[in-house]
């Protein structure tokens, strides 16, 4: 029950962070484009002696310019940082991380098992160390009271993605290691399940010509 909730929470938070970041980028681009378009209309109206159009465009420019979105870029960076950390843990769970296993695949099953266990244990140790060091770093940043330049939010909230994401990734490595030890199964991504990747068309007669 708890693991199912954690799996669902992981998927939801990644989706929400991605959706918010994309929406924010879209609004920021539209905002910037609208400012430039309104400025061009003002310039055009002045050159063609159209004071009413110039006044209307100038009013629109001032209204749009009043919506300050200088913080949007910074917010998107932080959203993608959080998304990347939780996405890395999700990648361990479903087995989509890139791995070099050409040498492991050439080993016999008896030798392949200890090598795989050592490799997974390395992932557990590394992510645990990153989570520990990240937590210590967040503690010192919070004590220093550092804030972000545009959003003026506490920077420890931003850096909190490192220990939390790494701890979750460590937990996923432990899950994968336990699953492999007990069943011999390693999670891997099946490319045939990806939309848009179809099987190669069968060779046609006459050199492939219709």
Image (tube, helix red, strand yellow):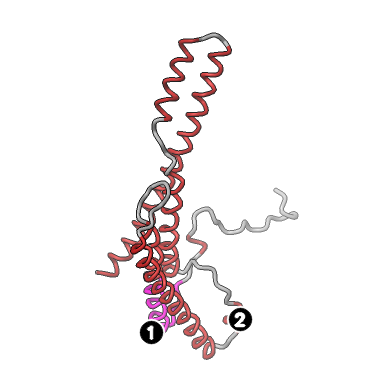
Q: Which mark is residue 103?
A: 2
Residue 164 appears in the figure: no
The alpha-carbon separation of the residues under discs 2 and 1 comes to 23 Å
Please identify the dominant SS of the magenta region.
helix
Q: Give the SS element for disc 2.
A: helix
The residue segment tinted magenta is 168-187
Farthest residue, direction bottom:
110
Q: Nearer the viewer, residue 148 or 49?
A: 148
Residue 134 appears in the figure: yes
Query: Which residue is pictured at 43% across the width and 67% down the height?
Result: 94
Quadrant of the image occupied by residue 61 = top left
Where is residue 140? Give x, y as percent.
37, 67
Farthest residue, direction front:
144
Q: Please, is residue 50 above or below residue 57 in the view? A: above
**Pointer 2: residues within 10 angstroms few (<14), some, or many (20+)?**
few
* In magenta segment, residue 180: yes
Quadrant of the image occupied by residue 128 = bottom left
């Amino acid at each position: 029950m708890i693991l199912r909730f954690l799996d669902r929470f992981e998927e939801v938070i990644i989706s929400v962070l991605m959706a918010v970041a994309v929406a924010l980028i879209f609004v920021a681009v539209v905002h910037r484009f609208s400012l430039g378009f309104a400025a061009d209309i003002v310039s055009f109206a002045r050159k063609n002696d159209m004071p009413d159009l110039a006044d209307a465009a100038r009013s629109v420019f001032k209204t749009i310019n009043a919506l300050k979105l200088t913080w949007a870029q910074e917010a998107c960076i932080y959203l993608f940082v959080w998304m990347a950390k939780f996405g890395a843990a999700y990648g361990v769970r479903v087995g989509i991380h890139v791995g070099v296993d050409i040498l492991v695949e050439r080993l016999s099953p008896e030798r392949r098992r200890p090598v795989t266990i050592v490799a997974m244990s390395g992932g557990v140790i590394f992510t645990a160390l990153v989570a520990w060091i990240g937590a210590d770093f967040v503690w010192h940043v919070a004590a220093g009271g550092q804030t972000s330049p545009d959003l003026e939010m506490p920077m420890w909230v931003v850096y909190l993605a490192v220990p939390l994401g790494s701890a979750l990734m460590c937990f996923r490595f432990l899950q994968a290691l336990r699953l492999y030890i007990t069943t011999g199964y390693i999670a891997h991504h099946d490319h045939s399940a990806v939309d848009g990747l179809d099987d190669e068309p069968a060779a046609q007669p006459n050199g492939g010509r219709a």
